[in-house]
Image (cartoon, rainbow, N blue to C red):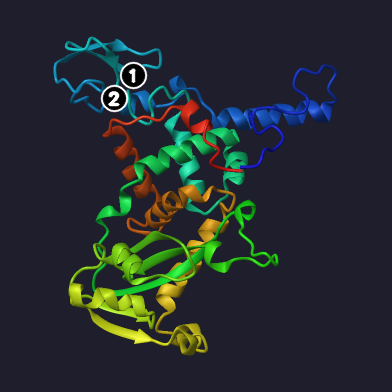
Amino acid sequence: MKNHPYSSSQRRTPWDGKEDLSPVQAFIRSRYLDTWQSHHRILKETDEAELLNHLEANCCRYCGSVSFIRNGYTSNGIQRYKCKDCSRTFTVLSNTLFDSHKISIMEWIEYLLNLFGYVSFHSTSRNSRIADSTVKYWLFKLFEILKHYQDNIVLSGTVYIDETYYHVMKKDLIRKYDGTLKAAENQYCIGIGYDGSRVYCHNEGLGINTSYQKTFDTFINHIRSGSALIHDRERAHSILIKPLELTSVSYNSSDCKKLPDKDNPLQPINDQCNLLKQFLRAHRGFSREFLQDYLNLYAFISNPPYNRLEKIEYLLNCVINNVKTIRYRDVMSQKADK
């Protein structure tokens, strides 16, 4: 992410610490801070403690022991426990991705709603009045939750597959001696499948073409045996037909491009490729090291449940029920974005 004025804290205004403000300056600053505070309520002012206290701890968040007792409440009113085996105290959020959080979970929900709408990270920072660094930190938490999200996706019925491409970062472009770009080394090949309900996408690595091995590795565990495969005449796709007992229907992509969208038999997969690129372009400054994480996020946004609040419910349950934490200093030490 690029640095922007006041990006370290969206609470700052140009008139902080100054005296003798004009009536207009004082009014703008006061209203701006009122809005900021409405987005950043302290935990005591929310019903978050009530929510968390309805969630019973089933084991120690540190050693896994089931021998523990209630041990009062935190300063924010959250039930605290003490383990009889390791003697550590914990809450239902200890050693999770919400460990030691100081702001309301509601802010994370607002952040997700922005993200689901393909809003850029800096726009999310402005909209929610949170620092760019916090947006990045929360993104890495989301990546961790979704790291294995696509592992169990198996497309079935009528399955469309294709490849699309996404460029390397501008600073990483590789050129020939004459200054022209090396096409094969400046594009990532992304295998994408779609069955009318769910989408699956996988980074196949650098190169402007797929291969038998790449296609096999990408799709062999993600298409149900006996499905109908709809695809262009990419030869590498044939590697899937026999082992998965697929019915193959192929079309010449050049001929299909001349057809209106409503008549194009490959349009369902073309639409998915276009939506994926739209999503990636909204976050174009990201390090390509994390391309697969962005693909996992796109698949999660695109797949059922389609209601955004149900998606948030899924993510919150994942956080609360899994012992995993990411420290702020570890994330911010990674130069993952511009």
Look at 53% across and 31% down and name the residue there: 332
Q: Which part of the image, by quadrant, shows the N terminus?
A: top right
Look at 45% across and 64% down and name the residue there: 189
Residue 238 position within the rendered picture, expressed as x and y whole percent measured from the top left? 29, 78
Q: Distance between the residues labelled 2 and 1?
A: 9 Å
Look at 41% across and 73% down and name the residue there: 269
Report helix, strand or loop for mark 2. loop
Q: Which residue was labeled with disc 2?
A: 92
- Quarter location, residue 34: top right
What amino acid is labelled 1 in the image?
Answer: Ile
Residue 258 position within the rendered picture, expressed as x and y whole percent measured from the top left? 52, 89
What amino acid is labelled 2 in the image?
Answer: Val
Left or right, 15 with respect to 216, comes to right
Compared with residue 82, is residue 219 higher up or lower down, i.e. above or below?
A: below
Dot 2 and dot 1 residues touching (CB under 8 Å): yes
Viewer-closest of 91 and 55: 91
Report helix, strand or loop for mark 1. loop
The residue carrying pointer 1 sits among few (fewer than 14), some (14 to 19) or many (20 or more) residues within 10 Å by Cα, namely many
- Quarter location, residue 182: bottom right
Q: Which residue was labeled with disc 1?
A: 78
Question: How many labels, in total?
Answer: 2
Tell us which disc is closer to us: 2 or 1. 2
Q: Which mark is residue 58?
A: none
Compared with residue 145, is residue 78 higher up or lower down, i.e. above or below?
A: above
Compared with residue 321, is residue 257 higher up or lower down, i.e. above or below?
A: below
Left or right, 126 with respect to 315, comes to right
Residue at the front extreme, as displayed: 177
User: Which of pointers 2 and 1 lies earlier in the amino acid sequence?
Assistant: 1
Look at 44% across and 87% down and name the residue there: 263
